[in-house]
Image: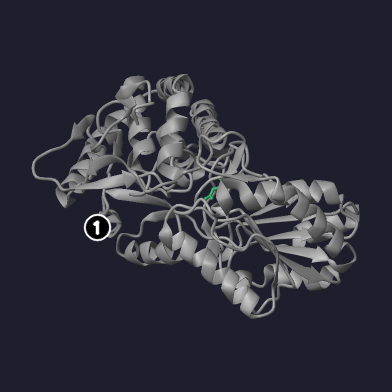
Amino acid sequence: MDRVKNKSLLHKSSFINGTWVKGDGRTSFNVTNPANGAPLMSVENATEADVHLAIASAEKAFPSFRSLPAKSRAILLRKWYDLIIENIDDLALILSLEQGKPLAEARGEILYGASYVEWFSEEARRIYGDIIPAASSDKRILTLKQPIGVVAAITPWNFPSAMITRKVAPALAVGCTVIIKPSEETPLSALALAELAKQAGFPEGVLNVIVTKDAAMAGDIFCQSSVIRKLSFTGSTAVGKILMRKSADTVKKLSMELGGNAPFIVFDDADLDAAVKGAIASKYRNAGQTCVCANRIFVQEGVYDAFAEKLKIEVERLNVGSFDTKDVAIGPLINKAAIEKVTRIIADATGKGAKILLGGEPHALGHHFHQPTILTNVTRDMACFSEEIFGPVAPLYKFSSEEEVIKLANDTPYGLASYFYARDIGRIWRVSEALEYGMVGINEGIISSEAAPFGGVKESGNGREGSKYGTDDYLEIKYLCMGGLT
Ligand code: SIN
């Protein structure tokens, strides 16, 4: 942390009602560097009282914040964006240190996250209602879009910055106030963003950050609170289901960005070099730790061997190392449990007949590093077919027909991202329409963008983040019926 130049970005405690709340006997925990386990900073655990205080502060701030002209909220968001960009080097460094991704990738995430703030600073002024033709001439039907109220956002460790801005920027744009609960693995990026929001001039209580190791405590309070009208969560499907159940009593509006099991299909008419490039971008981004990473790579039998060989050559070139190593492409996994999961998934596959084309072992660098791995001869009875790997392992399945691969691709409860490479225009339409997924990359391995609606179907969740649809999740439509107009 000594290398961070702007020391005002470094905070050790929760941010509530415009203040860093600390001391008073709160316990602490260490945030560590996943590349070597070294402690980076000791941060204070928020108490139950802190969570309640954050909710009360957001509730108090809501009436005046929602009443600000949209242009004023747009200006605040724009200032926040400008400050994020001014501090990009320090923000990327903090992110790499606590999350492990290579510095260049961390800079990419800061830019990606900032793009949501910029986008929603522009969208803030475009929240339109309607006038709808009524069934009788003495009436008029109007709709207003109004902010839903206090929002809680529970965000993950794999994108410690972008998953916050993607939820918070649309909420603030439309006049909601927010409480963020970042992952306990990566709270420092969240606190740095809060510092910049404070500097941008957001009023007290509009944006609060709760840092705690006791995620269940904060989650329970959020779910039970009738003040919180909206809960937005990015994380596992298992936790998403718990939050959905627990929110039932307060009938909250929910956005759930949950797990994925992305198929990546390479048809025999594909441009194989482009498919290899796309597979690497999708599979090995963030060391395989994204919800949209290619999880099952299906390759048509005529091009299977050629694709596997080309992929191997390119993956061999990916350097594994700590975030600041020269030309590093793959950092460590987040923790020991992640390494154990990858090891178990590889052992399960090889035990059932898969072959290791490349890698297959924890990396010689030790700690949480793993070799980029390619498995061939993979079949649907293996754990890697049904589980989200969340690591740098590419399993290659062989298929014969379009019909067969559509069935395989859809044979999962998940429905977040999917990808395919093909040239035939008829096939492109058929496959795009048949894939039961919220997002389809066609001859493209990177689909994330602030201008596009990110989200899933089935057990991958609901709601859309980013794009012109991104504000919908934070708005209520109110219908006004004006009568007696004769
Ligand atoms: C995620 O893994 O949840 C987000 C990935 C992205 O935004 O591209």
The answer to whether 389 is drawn above or below residue 172 in the figure is: below
- The residue to which callout 1 is attached is 217
| Residue 90 image offset from top left, x and y in percent | 43, 26
Residue type at the position of mark 1: Met
- Residue sitting at x 75%, y 46%: 277
Residue at image coords 45%, 34%: 169
Which quarter of the image is occupied by the N terminus?
A: top left
Choose top left, top right, bottom left or bottom right for residue 467: top right
- Residue 316, how many percent across, how many down? 70, 50
Colour treatment of the image: one colour
Task: Report helix, strand or loop for mark 1.
Answer: helix
Residue 261 vs residue 257: left or right? right
Instruction: Locate residue 30, reporting x and y percent.
Output: 27, 46
Q: Is residue 343 visible?
A: yes
Q: Nearer the viewer, residue 388 or 437?
A: 388
The percent position of residue 107, horizontal first and vertical second, equals: 53, 31
Is residue 139 visible from the viewing direction of this image?
no
